[in-house]
Amino acid sequence: MALKIEPRTEIDRRLVWVTPLLAVALTVLVGFFLFWAMGKNPLVTLYHFFISPVRDLYGVSELCLKAAPLILIGVGLSLGFRANVWNIGAEGQLTMGAIAGGGIALYFWEQDGAFILPLMVVASILGGMLYASIPALLKTRFGVNEILTSLMLTYVATLFLSILVYGPWKDPDGFNFPETRMFSESATLPLLLENTRLHVGFLVAIAVAVLAWILMSRTVLGFEIRTVGEAPQAAGFAGFDPARTTWFCLLLSGGLSGLAGLFEVAGPIGQLVPVLTPGYGFTAIIVAFLGRLHPIGIIFAGLLMALSYIGGENAQVEVGLPQAVTGVFQGLLLFFILATDFLTRYRIRSVEAPAATSKGGMA
Amino acid sequence: MSVELLVTVIGAATPLLLAALGELVTEKAGVLNLGVEGMMIVGAITGFAVAMSTGSATLGILAAAASGILMSLLFGVLTLTLLANQVATGLALTIFGIGLSSLIGANFVGTPVDRLPVLPIPVLSDIPIIGPALFNHDALVYVSIVATVAITWFLGRTRAGMILRAVGESDISAHSIGHDVIRVRYLAVMFGGLMAGIAGAFLSLGVTPMWIEGMTAGRGWIALALVVFASWRPYRVLIGAYLFGGVSILQLYAQGVGGVGIPSQVFSMLPYLATIIVLTIISAGPWRGRLDAPACLGRPFRASS
């Protein structure tokens, strides 16, 4: 008896939703043995990682707070990934968005006014878009790989932020710490729940995901994005311009990343600091895949990855686990997602060795 | 140019050269592994941890090479056997590697280790000026040079090298004349992992003999860019690595000497900006269209039964 792998003629719809759960289960299983190997009680550690952080309302509000930027960026990236546009520099676009929006907050820091926050939002979106337009331009004009350029620009953005907070934007009353002034009341996002840090950004992220779902499933543009990614030749025949798709996907994901950056600095952080996020721009890549590049799936994936951050911090406090476990978990999860994805595209069959098999394999 | 400056440029160029040569062989077989940064940083901490616990730099380098191979196998199983998307898997490898390295390295932060010993080449190193600059380095510097020559010879002059290139140029034809595409690609991917692991060990044992979290600082990505810059030719990788080594040293130099009123971060941006500019020039210039990327680069292959 031998195992035979054959492509499915049609993707199994149920498996598309089951495999992410399978991947999560496998990650937890590996986590169990990892904690055990590190000399911790695995069950207690898993409890502190996944359950105790969200036992109360405050915990859930923190979860939503951390999920918002991941969902926002993940949705943007997923559209690009579908069209084979690999924006890996969301972290840099997030940083530039935060700088642009934060700059407005600092400019008006002595003033009150309802115009400040909307202006910051616009600035952050434009900041992120502008930064994403560099890889878009280089890709469409000169054929430069957007993976490398967007990633290199992330290092540049982080250094640029560092110049500002160590230099001209440093808080003059801040005892020389590398941080800007705290943003004024008018420059911070309204809270959703009292006594929590959860702000309106979470609702925006959910709304963006729903809009993206409609865009992808109901509009010509969504069809164009999917066609360019799945069947570039057919897209050519249909008159779809891949350069236009590249621009659209990069500007959209850049703008959303910039907005996510603003939500951090005008939300829980309240000022510009040298390190704005624990790598949301990169984690959002995992979120996009875990959510099966589907906006609604991404909402759930964003919540789960947010839990991995909070759980990591919690496990650090409760059982003394190094913070780095979060990164390992996130990487493992992405591996399992990609591995189980195999099941949706191929079926594994056991065949009797001597029996004649049909010769219908693909070339 | 002073002798010391040349020596530091060689030090900065060597990890880039090692990692880029490994990726070049991987890509020549038609596989795009974006996980160089992840394999490199795991190599850096493994090499460091083993060298520190055993007191042997050689064991450290061997362990780093092994860790790079293990990481690349993870990539191979996913992309070659399970046909996962190569771009996404490479990114996963990097995210995983950065997490894993800081997990292993948590107990090693700030502890110094003995630097790789310098092995002067007899006679040659006695030549004035040229001797100390070129023939007075640690073993990995020599390895990187020898590897450049060996890979050039392997890809251009040997049967196995020809098969590897055939697999990268046309997997279907290579398969139809009886070559095992998947096996060749596994070997190429593992070689890439081995080189990236050694490149990482050079960082934590040679360039800065200590463990610092995130110490690869994008060098794995620059190595990937170097392969494009070199249009998939090993000796051009050598030139590129030394140019970039020069830029990153220039950056440190400028921070120390000049820099009146210029924030040090501006200089730190230079290697990244240089990468973007060079990639653009390479892609846009008269060479355009003659970049010679392997035709099957990044495409999954499944043998028909």
Image (cartoon, rainbow, N blue to C red):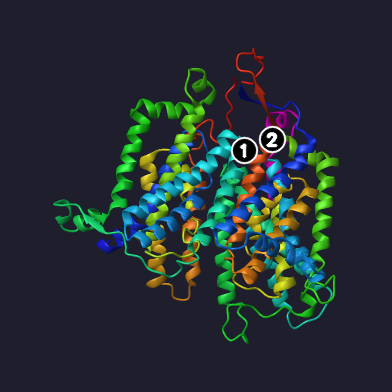
* Residue sitting nearer the eye, B78 or A119: B78
Q: Quadrant of the N terminus of chain A?
A: top right
Type of the residue with mark 2: Leu
For the magenta stretch, what is the residue range? A228-250
- Residue B38 seen in the current view: yes
- Residue A248 seen in the current view: no
Main secondary structure found in the magenta portion: helix
* Residue sitting nearer the eye, B80 or B19: B80
* Residue sitting nearer the eye, A162 or A349: A349
User: What residue would you read off at disc 1?
Assistant: B84
Query: Could you tell me which chain the residue with mark 1 belongs to?
Result: B
Type of the residue with mark 1: Ala
- Which secondary structure lies at badge 1? loop
User: What residue would you read off at disc 2?
Assistant: A343
Do badges 2 and 1 share one subunit?
Answer: no
Q: Is residue B43 toward the left or the right of residue A41 in the image? A: left
Q: Quadrant of the C terminus of chain A?
A: top right
Q: Is residue A70 toward the left or the right of residue B274 in the image? A: right
Q: Is residue A208 toward the left or the right of residue B148 in the image? A: right
Where residue A37 sits, quadrant-wise, is: bottom right
- Which secondary structure lies at badge 2? helix
Where residue A127 sits, quadrant-wise, is: bottom right
Measured as percent of width and height from the top left, residue A253 is found at 71, 53
- Crowdedness of circle 2 by 10 Å Cα count: few (<14), some, many (20+)? some
Does A242 appear in magenta?
yes
Who's the residue at 71% across and 31% down the image?
A: A236
The answer to whether mark 2 and mark 1 are in CB contact below 8 A is no
Q: Is residue B244 toward the left or the right of residue A54 in the image? A: left
Q: Is residue B185 above or below residue B148?
A: above
Q: How many marks?
A: 2
- Crowdedness of circle 1 by 10 Å Cα count: few (<14), some, many (20+)? many
